[in-house]
Image (cartoon, rainbow, N blue to C red):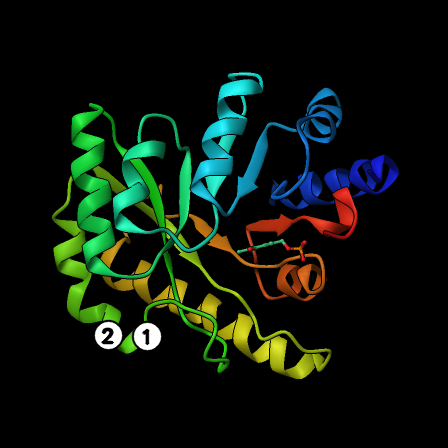
Amino acid sequence: MNLEFYTNLKQELDSKGITLVAVSKTKPNELILELYNQGQRIFGENRVQELVTKHEHLPQDIQWHMIGHLQKNKVKYIAPFIKLIHSVDNFELAKRIHKEALKNERVIDILLQIKIASEETKSGFEFSHLENVLHQILALNAIRIRGVMGMGTFTDQVEITEKEFKLLNDSFKTLKQQHFSKTPSFDTISMGMSGDYKIAIECGSSMVRIGSLLFGAR
Ligand SMILES: *Cc1c(COP(=O)(O)O)cnc(C)c1O
């Protein structure tokens, strides 16, 4: 656990109005509590079972974010408490989240995951396809679209990452202009991980998802 890094990072992010999601996947509750005791409240996980177990055992004022690929049939387990789902990448999933939100009498915040990397392994909406389904997603009144999320190509070539993050920022701006100009809550660009968060910040990120730099390698 790198508490000094946390303190410095938090200070930098706060001064820039950027939200930190501490990505705690695979890490034990004791480490999460250490960061919690430093004041961190937002934690991100990518597996439903692990997320549910941690939510049960850790302080109830933690805001849990789902950042990983989410299967429709597992939405019900996190719907009662999830604070933000970053990884909505198809309409069927959005519909299911809406349905489970209604059952729980709440509105669930989501991000639209957009495919910005050319790597096949990275999922997300193709921006051009998104336009076709967006009006259908907008009709689902128990979900609230807070913005976009993207994952850059795993590379040490800065120019590639930069290009992808700028693309995500452009996508956000286009959506904002065309569909959310009167929606102040459409305010989130989730981009940047341990390896590329500095580039993400330069490219306009409003939310970074950082795991290994805080908790150590997985
Ligand atoms: C694991 C993960 C992160 C954090 O990765 P680090 O490189 O450990 O910072 C961020 N976003 C997503 C979607 C992840 O799955």
The amino acid sitting under disc 2 is His
Instruction: Residue 21: give x, y in percent of width and height.
Output: 59, 42
Which label belongs to residue 129? 2
Front residue of 203 and 138: 138
Horizontal side, residue 8 vs residue 162: left or right:
right
Front residue of 102 and 132: 102
Per the model, the C-alpha gap separating discs 1 and 2 is 5 Å
Seen at 55% across and 70% down, the residue is: 165
Relative height, residue 191 to residue 29 (above, below)? below
**Within 10 Å of the Cα at label 2, are there few (<14), some (14-19), or many (20+) other Cα atoms?**
few
Q: How many marks?
A: 2
Ligand 1 sits in quadrant: bottom right
The amino acid sitting under disc 1 is Glu
Horizontal side, residue 79 vs residue 115: left or right:
left
Q: Circle 1 — which element?
A: loop
Instruction: Report if the CB atoms under discs 1 and 2 are less than 8 Å apart.
Output: yes
Instruction: Residue 184: give x, y in percent of width and height.
Output: 35, 43
Seen at 46% across and 68% down, the residue is: 168
Q: Which residue is mark 1?
A: 126
Seen at 60% across and 43% down, the residue is: 25
